[in-house]
Image: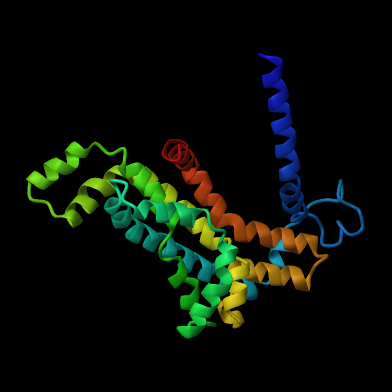
Amino acid sequence: MPRGTIFGRVIVGLLTIFALLPILWLAYSAFLPPNAALQGRIIGDGYTFDNFVKLPFDTLLRPLLLSLVLSSFVAFMQLVIALPAAYAIRNGTPALGIFLFLLSVPAELLLIPLYGLLQNLHLLNNPLALVVPFLASPFTVFLLYSGISKVPWTFVEAARLDGASNLQILTKVIAPLLRPEMTAAAVLGFAAHWNLVLYPRVVLNDSNWWTVQVALTELLRKNPNAWGTLGAAAIVTSLPILILYIIFERRVTKTLEGGLK
């Protein structure tokens, strides 16, 4: 193996370990006795599940369920809206440039104008504020557009000769062929919405509508030194994302490698 390749792999490995250290520490601290980390007893002091037992599920369970429902609905609606949009711009119409431009705009820049728009629509402090702005995703449209561009068009033409409408072509021809891209888009859309922190904090003041990430940051604010509790809470609230990536990781990776070249 060439030296350059070995050196590159060593550097990538070291950077990966460095990036994973905070995550590994948080996961490890979840199984330590409550005060072990603060007292420096992090090795050989035994392990426990007390941090999970003592989690404030009354304040975490509702946000967890709310995030599951909202993120799943948003991911589904993004597919419903993005599929016909990608089909409409399949020939590279000028609208494609708009989607490419929107992909380059940081979401934080849209927070202030979006806040004013939600205020005018009387959606502030309303759970709809967590759904309506995310129903359309430029990234999902572009991902499905990349998939449609690789579909053999003879299938579509054959369906048209059989008298199929555009809706039937989308649902019975295009959608089955784009199953990998749609799966990857759904997983990434779910994860993006699940990980929102700043946005729900700004548009919602009612703690009854806090998402799981907001509840987690509030737990951190109230217990900044409770490493065991924070580690346990982080593991529990990360389980849906971890399960999704474990199940669909290969499909997401292949789709991104093939669809975004």
- Depicted 113 relative to depicted 225: above or below: below
Q: Is residue 142 left or right of residue 59?
A: left
Image quadrant in which you'd find residue 159: top left
Please provide percent x and percent y for residue 102: 47, 57
Q: Nearer the viewer, residue 158 or 47?
A: 158
Can residue 57 be seen here? The reply is: no
Image quadrant in which you'd find residue 35: bottom right
Q: Residue at x 21, y 46 (%)?
A: 173
Q: Residue at x 68, y 62 (%)?
A: 233
Q: Residue at x 49, y 39 (%)?
A: 253
Please provide percent x and percent y for residue 226: 80, 65
Q: Nearer the viewer, residue 157 or 130?
A: 157
The residue sitting at the right extreme is 39
Q: Is residue 195 left or right of residue 86?
A: right
Instruction: Please say which color scheme the image uses.
Output: rainbow
Q: Is residue 234 left or right of residue 86?
A: right
The residue sitting at the front extreme is 94
- Depicted 23 relative to depicted 8: above or below: below
State the count of labels. 0
Q: Residue at x 82, y 51 (%)?
A: 46
The residue sitting at the left extreme is 162
Q: Which quadrant: the N terminus?
A: top right
Please provide percent x and percent y for residue 89: 30, 51
Q: Which quadrant: the C terminus?
A: top left
Can residue 103 be seen here? The reply is: yes
Please provide percent x and percent y for residue 73: 41, 65
